[in-house]
Amino acid sequence: MSDTLLAAVEAGLEVIDLGRELRVGMPQSPNHPHFWHALPRRHGDMERADGGSAANDMISMGTHVGTHIDALAHVSHNGKLYGGLDAQEAGRGGKYDALGAHTIEPMVRRGVLLDVAGHLGVDHCAGGYEITPADLEATAARHGISVGPGDVVLIRSGWGSRFVEGEPYVGRDSGVPGVSEAGAQWLAERRVHATGADTIAFERLAPGGGHALLPAHRVLLVEHGIYIVETLDLETLAARGHHVFTFVLVPLKIYGATGSPVRPLALVSA
C-alpha cells in the first residue's frame, strides 16, 4: 500500500454499503432461480466432547439475484457476444471461458452517482419512466460533475426505496424506470467502465412488458463491453450528497458464469 493511500485510510474514510441483504423471499427478476438459504446443521445437532458445537449453511441462487454484476457472457444479439464471439460456441461445455464472471477484474475506480430522482424533485421516478440523455446531462450539470472514460456511473431512479415492498419493486404491471437505448448510448459514448442502477433490470421496463425487450443490455454488454450492476441500494449515498467517490467492487470468481453476486462499496472522506 502506498504512503498516499495509507494516509488517506488513516485520515478517515466512510464506507457506504451499496449492496442488498440476501434474504429468502426478497424481490427479484422472475427469470432467475430464487435465493434460498438453509441450515443443514444447527447448534446442538452435534456436540464435541468438550461441549463445542458448530452450525453451517447451504445456499442456492441464480447469479443475477440480489445485488449482482452482469458478465459480458450474459447477453447475446443475433447469435453474437461482445467482440463478435459465437454465443453458442462460447458456451459449449456449460461455461463461458472467454467472457465469464471470472474475467471481471476487481474494480477500484472513480464512481459517479447521477441522482435523477433528486434532480427531478421526486421520491422516485414513475414506473415505466424513461431516463433520457437529457435527464442524465441535466443531473450531471446540477451536481457539477462530468462523466468520463473508466468511470462507474450509478443511476438513482429512487425506485430502490420500494425494495422493501416486495412485488411492487419488481414492477410487473407498473413498469420500472430506467434508461433505455438512448441512455445506454450516452453512457457508451463516454466510455464508462461499468454502470448500475437501483432496479432489478437496470433499464426501463414498460408497464406490463416485463423483460421482453432489453435494448440497453445489448448496447452496453454486447456492443461496448460495459458491465452492468443491478439491484443497488443508492439511498444512503444520495441522502448524504455524495456524487463522486471511490467505487469498490469484487465479483466472485465463478468460472464461466454469466454473472456474480457482489457487495459494492462507496468510499468517501469521513
Image (cartoon, helix red, strand yellow):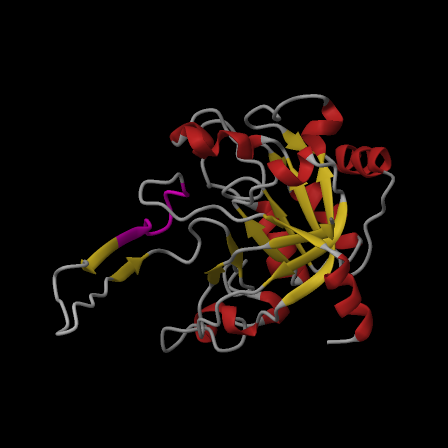
Q: Is residue 238 left or right of residue 24?
A: right
Q: Nearer the viewer, residue 186 or 140?
A: 140
Q: Position of residue 231 (x, y in %)?
A: 52, 44
- Main SS, magenta residues: loop
Toward the front, the furthest residue is 50
Magenta range is: 28-37
Name the residue rendered at 53%, 49% in the picture.
19
In the image: residue 156, left or right of residue 100: right
Residue 54, given in percent of the width and then of the height, sits at: 23, 65
93 lies above or below 132: below
Q: Nearer the viewer, residue 118 or 21?
A: 21
Residue 171 visible at all: no
Q: Is residue 35 magenta?
A: yes
Rendered view: 208 above or below 185? above
Residue closer to the observer: 215 or 229: 229
Q: Quadrant of the N terminus?
A: bottom right
As for residue 109 lying within the magenta part, the answer is: no
Q: How many marks?
A: 0
Q: Residue at x 62, y 26 (%)?
A: 125
- Residue 34 appearing in the image: yes
- Residue 138 at x, y percent in the picture: 82, 33
Q: Quadrant of residue 116?
A: top right
- Locate residue 242: give its quadrant: top right
Q: Residue at x 54, y 31 (%)?
A: 161
Q: Is residue 144 left or right of residue 107?
A: right
